[in-house]
Amino acid sequence: MAIVEVAIPVPLNKTFDYLCDGEVAVGARVRVPFIRKKVVGVILAVKDKSEFEKLKSVEEVLDDTPILDKPILDFLFWSARYYHHPIGEVICAALPKNLRLGKEAKIKKVTGLSLDTEKPDYKITDEQSHAINEILKSQDSYHGFLLHGVTGSGKTEVYLNITQTVLDQGKQVLVLVPEIGLTPQMITRFESRLETRVVAIHSQLNETQKLDAYLMAKNGEAGVVLGTRSAIFAPMPNLGLIIIDEEHDGSFKQQSNFRYSARDLCFIRAKQANIPLVLGTATPSLEMLKNVMDKKITRLTLTQRAGGATMPKVSLIDMRQHFTPQGGTEKSDGLLSNLLIEKMKQYLSKGKQVMLFINRRGYAPVYYCKECGWKAECGRCDSGMIYHRHINRLKCHHCGDEQMPEHTCPECKQPSLEVLGYGTERLEETLSSHFADTPIIRIDRDTTRRKKAFGEHLKKINSGEPCIIVGTQMLAKGHDFSNLAMVGILDTDAGLLSLDFRATEHLAQLLIQVSGRAGRNKEQGEVVIQTRYPDHPIFNYVLSSRYTQFAIQLLKQRSSALLPPYSHQALLCANAKNKQVAEDFLREAAGLLKSIQIDTVEIWGPVANIFEKKADYYYFNLYLQSDDRKALHQMLATFNQHIDSLKLKNKVRWYLDVDPIE
Ligand code: ADP
Ligand code: ZN
Ligand code: ZN
């Protein structure tokens, strides 16, 4: 009998040996007994000796041929090592649910072949053509490219072009896009242009569809796999090119369980497969700009909008004037300045669409007593309750708890409760009083929860009829609305005041991305930003579309403060219902880390998380930082080996986050 080494999805840094008769392949799934349960695992090795005695037997071999081939297994091993995460859980994260459950690896319905493809009715620009040629020059070897093109500059056209060339050589292409909002439009564009099967992998598919897509990638039938972050693990035997669109987007980082960055893993996958990698964006992350400066990747630029469109005109409205009686002549309700309303009217009367961006959903962020100052807060989190009018509930956006709002103040018993501030829902209501005859389309998590809802909203917008679009940052990404002429950005000031060292980088990206939705057709669009801090340096750059210069300023600050990308970080987070235990565990962990004695790694904390309490649990962090990535990882690896020596380990929930972004 052979002995097989099996990876099982448990949070333990080890694999398990079982007896197995008959032929089995590395990378095949097996069902095995594991502590009173049956679990599905993946064979990592077949051997004739084990250091353990009394091995149990494999119950069932689920695959005749490997579900994971050697290249993808190597990639998963690399990922597990880098993120110091158990290989069993990493493999589990890489497989579609039906395979994890042990279901048969069989395609139910072949999809993704479009009937007619059409060629574009325009010629590619010189800049596009230069980018395409440069990328195709290194078709047969690893090379990273930052495709830095302003919004609407035709980056997608570049993707389509290079993809077709790679497909023509019988190879496959992996395209990663940020979360669901963007996928329908991208899928259509890829399907209608490329002569191949395009399969999508994202969260809106059902489990059968996800498995089908996975298997079509694996057997090579799918020429293009287009998906959100988990698609980085799609098996593609003939992979010839990886494209990651909107590289700067935070959604490429998984923020639970196995905390990987699909963007960062792209580099490893491309290197292992020895193929080019293209990272596209209008607002590169500081990490990628540093890579360009260090000559690790090549920057290709598209400086002009395609098809004769020009960049929008950006201006500020100083909101301080609206609150000083002698300051200005305008009156406003605190959210919309008269100037903004006037501009909106002008565009709407010309048959154009207008979009307003506000980064908060719900009706109002504060429900309070105007007599005594009492405020509705979540009993389980350190945060206020947000009022949602259409369901007449107070909701906590951190734990999801809901309450009926009180009618009298629980403190002073007066009937003096009121809402304060604005969310998308209240903005929609206010707008309908100013613009009674104009359709208003609200896009946020509440109006798009239903499957297909987002698509329906997009369809309405794409019909081109004049309307007002109200939305959260869901709208910032990639959309190409051809009749959208004006964008108003209502509340950016929180981002200017934030303590997070990445806040200004993210705000600049957001402002430019949101602005980038305007005027993508021939006529110049307009962007208006309302702020109480018009003198903030960020606006200097945003107003004149000098993102790169702004980013270089930020990089200088990061460099002198030794913050990422000039240093590397890891975070050990612990949370428990008992605050003391969470803190004590991290003190114990800090003791263990310090005993490893790698003095190039700084350790600080434990410190309370910004939201200390969430859903009854207290969150504390321990930060590790070093300018020597190797040293940091050496410390984490040693820490992992000795983790069992921590006495409080089983009294808290904890995780390690390598290269955290929050
Ligand atoms: P990006 O991805 O850079 O934001 P897109 O690829 O979506 O830009 O292109 C913006 C618009 O310009 C699209 O409607 C696209 O069809 C059009 N376009 C792209 N390349 C050209 C070109 N060379 N000439 C004319 N129009 C183009
Ligand atoms: Zn009161
Ligand atoms: Zn809560």
Image (tube, rainbow, N blue to C red):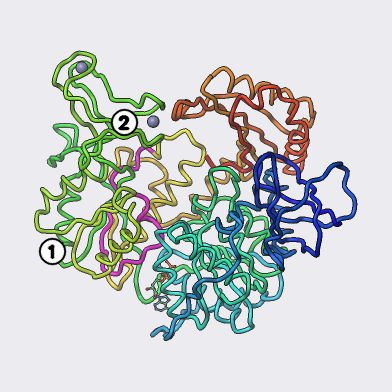
Residue 334 visible somewhere in the drawing: yes
Label 2 lies in ligand 3 vicinity (Cβ under 8 Å): yes
Looking at the image, residue 599 sits to the left or right of residue 314; the answer is: right
Mark 2 lies on residue: 385
Instruction: Report which residue position mark 1 lands on.
Output: 349
Q: Amino acid at mark 1?
A: Ser
Against 197, is 14 above or below? Answer: above
Tell me: 168 left or right of 429. right
**Magenta stretch in the rendered image:** 472-494
Work out which quarter of the rendered image holds the N terminus and state it.
Answer: bottom right
Q: Dot 2 lies on which element?
A: loop
> In the rendering, at what x and y percent does residue 411 appear?
23, 14
Q: Tell me where residue 189 appears, x and y as whole percent.
A: 42, 74
Closer to the camera in the image, 148 or 373: 373
Compared with 492, 62 (above or below) is below
Q: Of the residues tagged 2 and 1, which is closer to the observer?
A: 2
92 vs 639, nearest the viewer: 92
Residue that appears at 62% across and 71% down: 241
Please tell me in which quarter of the rendered image ligand 1 is found: bottom left
Q: Nearer the viewer, residue 13 or 621?
A: 13
Ranked by sequence position, the earlier of labels 2 and 1 is 1
The reply to whether the magenta stretch includes residue 493 is yes
Furthest-top residue in view? 412
Q: Is residue 245 visible?
A: no
Residue 402, percent across and down? 31, 33
Give residue 546's quadrant in the image.
bottom left
Disc number for residue 643: none
Amino acid type at image mark 2? Met
Q: Which residue lies at the image location 67% right of the left edge and 64% below the top edge?
A: 67
Q: CA distance from mark 2 to mark 1?
A: 38 Å
